[in-house]
Image (cartoon, rainbow, N blue to C red):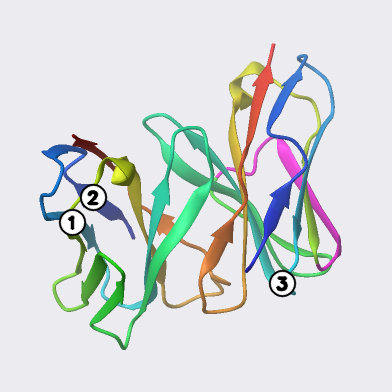
Amino acid sequence: KQEVTQIPAALSVPEGENLVLNCSFTDSAIYNLQWFRQDPGKGLTSLLLIQSSQREQTSGRLNASLDKSSGRSTLYIAASQPGDSATYLCAVRYAGGTSYGKLTFGQGTILTVHP
Amino acid sequence: DVKVTQSSRYLVKRTGEKVFLECVQDMDHENMFWYRQDPGLGLRLIYFSYDVKMKEKGDIPEGYSVSREKKERFSLILESASTNQTSMYLCASTKRGYEQYFGPGTRLTVT
């Protein structure tokens, strides 16, 4: 079964820390992997998309890496701020079949950055 | 910027009512999706559409139907709402192979 797992489920850090969120997937045959942010009661905001041929993507203080062979992706957040507090979701588009862009989501990591 | 809009942020309906949730995207995306999100269960795909009038069932289609008469609009229909359909409903769209963009969500309560 194609699954996505995120560890840890929750993380609390002081402001200014660099942190890493982890995502693992069960099948290395993927089209891409996408990281999202979700604020309470809101929709998902796309942060980074990594195609299967790429190793990493960067946007501002965010850096996402992809290692297909080990079935892992990490989201690195530099110099965390209280405004980064949210739930972070990892989603994988597995290859094969007629998926038409269907994503398989992890359960998310709830991040709290305290001043 | 891609924009995905949903017709309501909050909706309260009674058991047995027919409920329509509307989603519109403005970027000419071929693929559109309806998910529901519940605590502890994460996001689950209800239905998706890869072209006008084309649809496929997702992981939890029971109790739902969809309609896509125009490329930009994808509707989710609850034929007879039940309390176990109380949830956050999220619409998304994508151009094939690229980023998936989400709407703001509709919090539906069925009483």
Among the 4 quarters of the image, the one containing residue A68: bottom left
Percent position (x, y) of residue A45?
A: 48, 55
Question: Which marked residue is nearer to the observer: mark 3 or mark 1?
Answer: 3
User: Among all residues in the image, which is located at the extreme top?
Assistant: B111
Q: Which residue is mark 2?
A: A6
User: Residue sitting at 39 percent across and 75 percent down?
Assistant: A32
Residue drawn at 58 percent across, 53 percent down = B58
Q: Is residue A89 above or below residue B72?
A: above
Q: Residues within 10 Å of mark 2 (few under 14, many from 20)?
A: many
Please tell me if label 3 and label 1 are on a single chain. Answer: no
Mark 3: few/some/many CA within 10 Å (<14, 14-19, 20+):
some
Left or right of residue A40, residue B11 in this image: right
Q: Residue at x 62, y 50 (%)?
A: B103
Is A70 situated above or below A51? above
What quarter of the picture does the N terminus of chain B occupy? bottom right
Quadrant location of residue B4?
A: bottom right
> Are the residues under marks 2 and 3 on the same chain?
no
Give, as a three-letter code, the residue at label 3.
Met
Q: Check if mark 1's residue and mark 2's residue have beta carbons within 8 Å.
A: yes
Callout 2, which amino acid? Gln
For the record, the magenta segment spans B60-71
Q: Is residue B79 above or below residue A7?
A: above
Q: Indicate the position of residue B86 as horizontal and vertical percent values.
A: 61, 23
Name the one closer to the observer, A45 or A106: A45
Residue denoted by label 1: A22
Amino acid identity at mark 1: Asn
Residue nearest the viewer, comparing B21 with A41: A41
Chain label for disc 3: B
Image location (x, y in percent) of residue A63: 24, 69
Query: Quick check: can you spot residue A97?
Result: yes
